[in-house]
Amino acid sequence: GQQVMQIPQYQHVQEGEDFTTYCNSSTTLSNIQWYKQRPGGHPVFLIQLVKSGEVKKQKRLTFQFGEAKKNSSLHITATQTTDVGTYFCAGPWNYGQNFVFGPGTRLSVLP
Amino acid sequence: DTEVTQTPKHLVMGMTNKKSLKCEQHMGHRAMYWYKQKAKKPPELMFVYSYEKLSINESVPSRFSPECPNSSLLNLHLHALQPEDSALYLCASSLTGDYGYTFGSGTRLTVV
């Protein structure tokens, strides 16, 4: 069946360092979404990518969708303590257009 | 209004109790979802309502019973739960299934 991996599982960075998380699917996706969940909080929608090779930026965050639409990445430039949380990719892996979450990457930022 | 409101925020219930979780949104979203999240795990999809009709039930035990009284409300009725059902229950909505989801802050459920 369809599988999704996110790497790394955990990442500890010093404040000001860059951070990247990768989402890899065993099958081609029609689109992919990214969410952030702060400790003790709920997932918050960040972005949706639809087109092959698409790149979108939100301030210090850069999102990419692979050319083959089987992988995606989220890059954060110059991390801040407010970036702490778990970053999930979500895709229509099992249910058509309804989204299922990847396992997540937990980011810690040391001041 | 750009929020999904869930009540209660916390719930402790015994294994013989019946309780309900409530979710409300006034954004005109036509898809609503229940997710279950265990600590340090991703949210797991339980139910999907599309235009007030149940479209997906991901093999959830019958002790969980969803209800969508109208396009703004979503309930999750709980009966005879087990301690392993303790988790954060998240409600979400989206314009349709193709758009980003707006999540509520969740109900933290403890079954004793």
Image: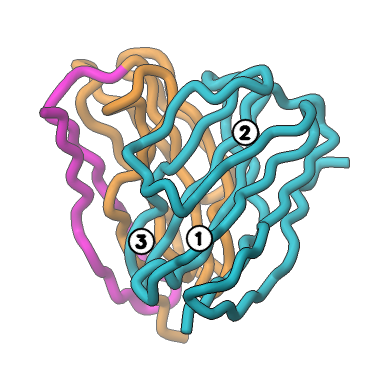
Instruction: Estimate the spatial distance between the alpha carbons at disc 1 and disc 3, rounded to whole Å.
Output: 19 Å
Residue on which the image places disc 2: B32
Q: Magenta region: which residues?
A: A1-29
**Residue in the foreground of this view, choosing between B52 and B65:** B65
Q: Residue A27: where, in percent of width, then height?
A: 16, 22
Name the residue rendered at 59%, 80% in the picture.
B12
Residue at position x 57%, y 32% in the image: B100
- Residue indicated by mark 1: A37
Q: Which residue is mark 3?
A: A18
Tell me the SS state at disc 1. strand
Please tell me which residue lies in front, A72 or A1: A1
Give the colour in which the image draws chain B: cyan
* Same-subunit check for callouts 2 and 1: no
User: Chain A takes which shade in the image?
Assistant: orange
> Image quadrant for the N terminus of chain B?
top right
Mark 2 → mark 1, Cα distance in angstroms: 19 Å
* Chain of the residue under label 1: A
Q: Tell me which residue sits at (54%, 45%) in the image.
A: B65
Residues at discs 3 and 2 both on one chain: no
Q: Label 1 neighbourhood size at 10 Å, few (<14), some (14-19), many (20+)?
A: some
